[in-house]
Amino acid sequence: MNSAARLRMTMLIGAIALMAGLTLWGMQDSWRRIAQLERKLTASQLGSFRLAEEFQQRLHTQGELLLRYTARRSPATWTQFQAASSQLDQWIGEQIAKHPNPRELDLFHQLNTAYADYLAAAAQVQTNGQPAGITAEAFTQLEHVERTEDQLHQLGLQLAGMHREAEALFLADANHTLANLRVFLFIGVVLLLALVAVLGVILYRDLIAPLRRKLVQSEVLLEKQEKLATLGTLAAGIAHEIRNPLTSIKARLYLLGKRVATDAASTADTGVISSEIGRLERIVQDVLHFARPSEPQLKVVRADAPLRDVFTLMGRTLESGRVQLAIEAGPELHVSIDAALIEQVLINLVRNAAEAIEGQGRVTLRVRASHAEIHGRSSSVAVLEVTDTGKGIPPEVEKRLFDPFFTTKDAGTGLGLSIAARIVEKHGGALEYQTQPGHGTTFGIVLPVVPAPATGSAIPPA
Ligand code: ADP
């Protein structure tokens, strides 16, 4: 997985963890709020009923005590009345201290004033000097007490109403909060699922799909290599068997050539036989190279050194005038190579390039600095390029380009590119190409760049 994909994945996992955390927090908060609501509802419901009920009860007790006192004028009853009234007074004080809500506070203050009026009216009953029993005057005074008591009852009822109202408001608020929480949780879960889906897609695209592709490629490569190994062993055996008789045929032909030197027709025949033997030898050589590639003897050289050698070697041998061989100046890079093997690859590429040019054309050699993935990591590389202005490679040939023994030429062996690719791979590099049918092809030998050797030990360019 590359670093961009790793970063994408890390960010996504972070986002999922954040979303999951938020959703969990939302759920936990909603449970807490529901529990709080339950507790508050029970407490406030009971509280509001109890408040009004308790007030009525206490008032009722006081009313009874006052009536009893009026009837009997017993000082003990009056003391009881006073004790009850101071308790109720204290209770009102406590409620004022407990309810800071302005409306309730106002109501309790009204209650306090009305209660003071009630006590004043009750005090008149005690101080009127009337005998025991309910006289007309006492009755009038009791009626006055009753009126103030009624007022107090009204205020008590208002208190209960106010509590219910507050409760309704609290419920509406709680419902609103719960609805919001529900929406939040729903969005959270949907987002979480979406993020998980995206993670799945990215995992598949960046991790599983490339792995699958690599696996399929490795299987194909393994199968191909197995086939090649069998083919190589067979080919090497045959090539070896052909080489010995070929050497003796060549020796006999040489002697024969001497003997018939005076006969022009026979000399022409021996010439043809000799060139065909040369071709056979090249095929045998190619097959042996393919079957038993030699181990490269590595040495650090300037990357353009093998190009210059090949340029000197082949410049003149290419069909004079038809194909022009050129070399371009490039950056000073160093590579660790077996110069003879890399030159063999270059000769092959130049020969193919020249053969792909129908009529006039040009083959250019150059070194280019680049970056490429070698053994799974990006490295600085030198690319030794062979560019031609030939016919390009048609798609049907591209499919089989590196297949051994695949050739489109009458006299080709189809081993050039297979051997070249194998040699470059043995150098830890790769053979790449770009082609444009009708315009030309560029083959590139990609080699890892190495540090320049200490002065004096580097091989200077030819
Ligand atoms: P050979 O040269 O013996 O045919 P190679 O393995 O070198 O074997 O090449 C295989 C085939 O690839 C060639 O027959 C040719 O069709 C194609 N080819 C190679 N190089 C080029 C090129 N530069 N331009 C067009 N076709 C090419």
Image (cartoon, rainbow, N blue to C red):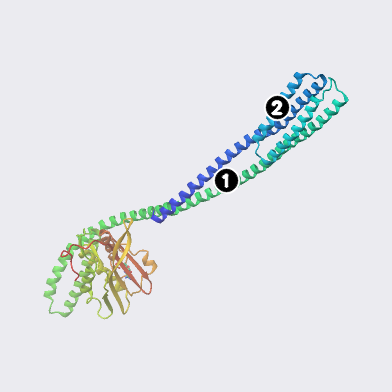
Q: Position of residue 238 (x, y in %)?
A: 23, 59
Residue 52, quarter of picture: top right
Residue 257, quarter of picture: bottom left
Q: Residues within 10 Å of mark 1 (few under 14, many from 20)?
A: some
Name the foreground residue: 49 vs 210: 49
Gap between marks 2 and 1, in whole Å? 54 Å
Residue 330, quarter of picture: bottom left
Q: Nearer the viewer, mark 2 or mark 1?
A: 2
Q: Is residue 244 toward the left or the right of residue 391 in the image? A: left
* Residue 86: assigned label: 2
Q: Residue at x 45, y 52 (%)?
A: 11
Q: Of callouts 2 and 1, which one flags the residue occurring earlier in the amino acid sequence? A: 2
Task: Identify residue type, mark 2.
Answer: Ser
Q: Which residue is mark 1?
A: 185
Disc 2, SS: helix
Q: Residue at x 32, y 75 (%)?
A: 357
Residue 160 in view, yes or no: no
Name the foreground residue: 274 vs 210: 210
Q: Position of residue 294 (x, y in %)?
A: 21, 59
Q: Position of residue 48 (x, y in %)?
A: 69, 34
Rendered view: 332 above or below 17:
below
* Residue 297: assigned label: none
Q: Residue at x 78, y 31 (%)?
A: 149
Task: Identify residue type, mark 1.
Answer: Leu
Q: Residues within 10 Å of mark 2 (few under 14, many from 20)?
A: few
Where, quadrant-wise, is the C terminus in this rendering?
Answer: bottom left
Name the foreground residue: 5 vs 254: 5
Q: Position of residue 248 (x, y in %)?
A: 15, 65
Q: Is residue 297 toward the left or the right of residue 444 in the image? A: left
Residue 422 in view, yes or no: yes
